[in-house]
């Protein structure tokens, strides 16, 4: 079944048409890759989906779980289970892993923050993403690969159903990238749907079910990777809009 349909999405900034009639269909339980050159509109499309740009600031329709979604901010999309992890991580360097995981959604006991409960829950979430650290460690004292895992643990604290990752492995080394990809595979086993922005064809081939290609703010096509494989020439031609030899 289809989980998400974005129909004819258009988004303009002063002097820039970032998205023109973009369509995206994501099936429940799949890993859907979005790829395109820098400036193609990938991040903007995901910001429209997650309410960073609210209803009214773009045109077109979003149908999620069979109903029209009109998010007025990111809190609303999170309540619907849509969680976005941006290219620039949104963690607070001088706060601990636990504090970052629960920032803005602390477990509460009769109005007061239940700190013991938060730490216990943080450890559970950290175990789920394979993060083996003291939960009191400050964010600034762990590497970027582990910071990315804290962001994912934070998504699970919010009961994520659709996880959006914007170039999640761009700053990661080979080992941390591999761990992240394994994690995403595991989430799929448990029914989480993911959208991953990436231009690394090897990692798309390793985990994605489908890939949507964007170019200059337009949808080029969606390919089914399990069926068609990763046709590198076709994908790259879609991204740049011309034969490779004729740059
Ligand atoms: P991608 O993520 O594919 O690299 P973006 O979605 O970030 O592309 O950007 C698409 C286009 O919209 C680019 O031309 C970019 O400069 C422009 N753009 C993105 N965000 C803004 C913004 N907040 N204000 C003005 N222009 C923007
Ligand atoms: Mg970019
Ligand atoms: Mg981007």
Image: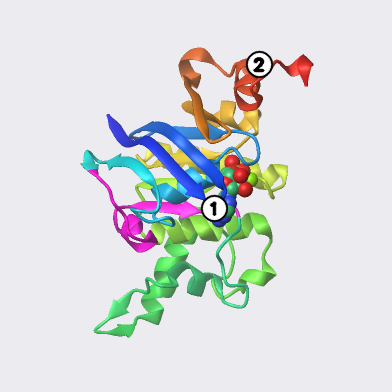
Q: How busy is the neighbourhood of tag 2: few (under 14 within 10 Å), some, or many (20 plus)? A: few
**In which quadrant is the N terminus drawn?**
top left
Is residue 46 positioned above or below 232 on the image? below
Q: Secondary structure at mark 2?
A: helix
**In which quadrant is the C terminus drawn?**
top right
Q: Which residues are magenta?
A: 68-87
Q: Does the rendering let one see residue 167?
A: no
Q: Nearer the viewer, mark 2 or mark 1?
A: 1
Viewer-closest of 232 and 133: 232
Residue at image point 55% right, 64% down: 90
Residue where numbered disc 1 is placed: 14
Viewer-closest of 94 and 186: 94
Some atom of ligand 1 lies within 8 Å of the CB belonging to the residue at label 1: yes
Q: Relative to residue 133, is residue 106 drawn left or right? A: left
Residue at image point 41% right, 53% down: 83
Per the model, the C-alpha gap separating discs 2 and 1 is 34 Å
Residue at image point 63% right, 28% down: 201
Q: Secondary structure at mark 1?
A: loop
Residue where numbered disc 2 is placed: 233
């Amino acid at each position: 079944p289809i989980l998400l349909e974005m129909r004819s999405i258009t988004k303009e900034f002063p002097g820039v048409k970032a998205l023109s009639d973009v369509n995206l269909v994501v099936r429940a339980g799949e890993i859907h890759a979005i790829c395109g050159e820098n400036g193609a509109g990938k991040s903007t499309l995901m910001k429209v989906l997650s309410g960073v740009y609210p209803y009214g600031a773009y045109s077109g329709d979003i149908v999620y779980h069979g109903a029209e979604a009109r998010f007025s901010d990111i809190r609303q999309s999170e309540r619907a289970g849509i969680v976005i992890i941006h290219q620039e991580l949104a963690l607070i360097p001088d706060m601990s892993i636990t504090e970052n995981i629960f920032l803005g959604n602390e477990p509460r006991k009769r109005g007061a923050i239940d700190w013991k409960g938060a730490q216990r829950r943080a450890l559970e979430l950290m175990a789920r993403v394979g993060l083996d650290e003291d939960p009191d460690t400050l964010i600034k004292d762990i590497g970027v690969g582990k910071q990315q895992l804290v962001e994912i643990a934070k998504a699970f604290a919010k009961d994520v159903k659709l996880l959006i990752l914007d170039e999640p492995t761009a700053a990661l080394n080979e080992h941390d990238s591999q761990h992240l990809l394994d994690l995403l595979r595991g989430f799929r086993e448990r029914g989480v749907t993911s959208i991953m922005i990436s231009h690394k064809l090897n990692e798309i081939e390793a985990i994605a079910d489908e890939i949507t290609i964007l170019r200059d703010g337009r949808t080029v096509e969606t390919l089914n990777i399990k069926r068609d494989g990763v046709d590198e020439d076709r994908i790259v031609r879609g991204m740049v809009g011309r034969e490779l030899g004729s740059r």
